[in-house]
Structures are given as structure tokens and as C-alpha cells.
Amino acid sequence: MSSSSDVILDRLMSLHPKIIDLTLDRMTRLLDALGNPEQTMPPAIHIAGTNGKGSTQAMIRAGLEAAGDKCHAYTSPHLARFHERIVLSGEIIDEASLADYLAECEAANGGVPITYFEITTCAALLAFSRTAADYTLLEVGLGGRLDATNVVDQPAIAVITPVSIDHQQYLGETLAEIAGEKAGILKRNCFAIVGPQQDEALDVIEAKAGEVGATCKIYGQHWHVWEENGRLVYQDENGLLDLPMPALIGAHQVQNAGIAIATLRYLGKDDVAFEGAMLNANWPARMQKLRHGPLIDAAGDAEIWLDGGHNKAAGYALAEALGRLPDRNLYLVVGMLNTKDATGYMEPLKTRTDKLYGVSIPGESATLSAQETVEAAREVGFDAQEATDFETAVADIVKTDPTARILICGSLYLAGNVLQLNG
């Protein structure tokens, strides 16, 4: 039986013919009708970027919570349940509260066109404004300038993680155009932490900061982070920090950790927060090792890992992270959306293995078919074959290689399907 929130969410999907329609007009109209909750919620830490937004947010949140702060958090998309998108004072929103906030937004909207992401973002902001906390962590959904989260006039701090090519149909074809959209979260006289960027992106971000009077602390100029002797070293004008490596695996997580520490430094936090950010962050479907569920029960001595990255930069980051694991035969189970650069994503992974199974993503109309995924994989040089679903692929791999390492990857939507069955 559908829950109350599921019924409302289904109705909200029909309020606008497009899933994505970037503008802030509908947001400001509905927020006005709701009494502008975005103006009364706890101070916002607003996070944009192409890769690393979720991991960076998870580390900032872990650091703040280690320091005793209560945090709201907003992320998208969800993996297994919509409720995951809204964290109220450290806890995923409960069903009754979610249904109530959605119903209130639906009534205030009065049936006029608004996208699903916009009206559900309004529900999150309403919930944040009515629940006590010290900070609100807001992850941009798409872009920045016209994203539904970009309604906060004075964030406590803005954060821009690395920018790369993705979502060109909405954000522009060039890195400069995409960076311009991300830099749209910079507000007049606000403070910003900027992660590692390619020169073309950084030029645009710095120009936007100059235009609005934002003060930026930029990787490579104002702060540095690196890995040394199995430790994470961070340095800025306040001195050097020697910290444990992040719980999240990969060189890209060292960069994300640096962004998180720079943010925590600006907020006046100390070593307790920095260590908490490194050791306590949890971010599902980012090089996540599955530990229980029917898939694990069926796998025997094989390892199963899960990752939701889906663009070229994510492919390189994932290949590097895989290189940090002890040797084992690696097999990829890949499902992707047809809006993504499949060969660009898979090419760097070819350095780790040539064994790949292509699957379609259940319930996603925009999925690449298993056949299309296999064709893209073979183009890159994989020894690839189709499977009807990820369970069949895992069973086939385990039958031929009982101690295999299996990575299910290529899409957050595929990761969500896996976690729904094995979370």
C-alpha cells in the first residue's frame, strides 16, 4: 500500500510537463505563499559543483556533528526512499512530517505549474524553518544560478566543488559556461570555499566573485591539501593540520576533505570537528562496500561494491580509488542513463579490468539498454556481455570466479535499485 507521501509525490509529478525547467520564478512565488521559510531556517551552507557535492556535504556534516552542532541537510536524488533527501537535525525526516509538509506546499501552490524538484525543495525549506538546528546544508540539484535551492540571499558560506563537463543540455557546452552556472550561488559579500578547478572554470568563478564582492578561499592559492605517509595534510594561513585519511576512499576524497576542512576552519571549528569529518562521514553509493542483504548472501566469498558516479571525471576518480584496494579479480556491472557519456565514463575504468556486464536500469525510461551499454563498453575495449539484471550478472560472475570483486556502477539510479534490495 502506498504511503501518504508517495501518493502526494505522485500527484506533484503531474504539475509540470518537464522534469527540469530552470528558473526561480515558480520557487519565489510558492515560497512567498508559504511565508518565505528560506529566510528563517538555520544558516545555510550552500554547495554546488559537478563532482563531490554529496561527499563534501557528508564530511562537513560529520565535522559539525562531531563538534556538537545539529544539522539539517538536503540532497538529491535519493537512492532508496525519497525521505533520504531531507535530514532534520541529524535524522531522516519521518513519514508523517514529510506527508504534512508536502500537503502544505501542495495546497499553497494551488495546482499551478511547478516542477517536482521545486515543490519538494519548498517542502524541505519549510521543514528546515520549523525545526531547530545550527546549520542547514543545501546541496544544489542542477547547476546553481537557477537551481531551486538558490533562493537563500545570504548563505553562511558558499562551497564550489570541482566543476567538469556534465548536463550540457541544461548548463552549456563549455566548461566556462558550466562554471558560470555553478558560480551563480555566489552572493553579494558572501564567503566562499572553492575546491580544485581547471583554469577555465576558475577564471569564471573568480570573475563572478569579483562582480558580486564575494570573498573566496581557493584551493592552491589560500589552502592546500595532500596525502602523505597515509595521513591527510591540510595547510592554510592558520597553519598545518595532520589528520587521518578520510573514511571515503580515493584521491578525489582527499580533495573533498580539504574543501570540508576549509569550510569548518572558516566556521571556527577545531580538531574535534576536523577528525570527525575524516572518520565519521558516511555517503552511500560512493565506493560503498555492501555488507548485508540477499545479494551478499548469494555472493559467498565475493566482494560487492557500489558506486553511483556517472561522468568522465567520476570514471577517473573511481579508477584511482579501485587502485587503492588489495588485489582481486575485478568485474564491472554497469547500467547508465542515455543522457550520459558512457564511453567517457568507462574508458578510465579499462585500466583496472576488461571484464564488464551491461544491464539496463529497472524502472528508468531514460536507461541505456543492456545491449547499448555493452556496445559502448566494447568500443572502449572491454570484454563485455549483457545480463538481464544486476542479480543475474552477480550470480554469473560468482559461478565462474567465487572470490571476485564486483563493482556495480554507472548511475545513482542503478545504485538506488541495489540499495532498495540490499541496503
Image (cartoon, helix red, strand yellow):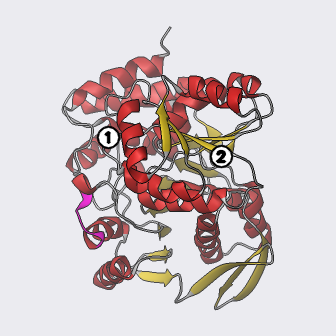
Q: Mark 1 points at which residue?
A: 338
Name the one closer to the observer, 262 or 169: 169
Seen at 53% across and 33% down, the residue is 416
Q: Which amino acid does label 2 sit on?
A: Leu
| Observer able to see residue 239 | yes
Q: How many labels does the image show?
A: 2
Q: Earlier along the polypeptide chain: callout 2 or callout 1?
A: 2
Residue 317 on the magenta span = no
The boundaries of the magenta stretch are 171-175
Name the magenta segment's main secondary structure: loop
**Residue 128: % across, % down:** 51, 45
**Residue 166: % across, % down:** 34, 57
Residue farthest top in this picture: 1
**Residue 224: % across, % down:** 61, 84
Name the one closer to the observer, 164 or 42: 164
Q: Which amino acid does label 1 sit on?
A: Asn
> Is 106 placed above or below 193 here?
above
Seen at 48% across and 12% down, the residue is 2
Q: Is mark 1 on a helix, strand or loop?
A: loop
Q: Name the residue under label 2.
A: 330
Of badges 2 and 1, the one in the foreground is 2
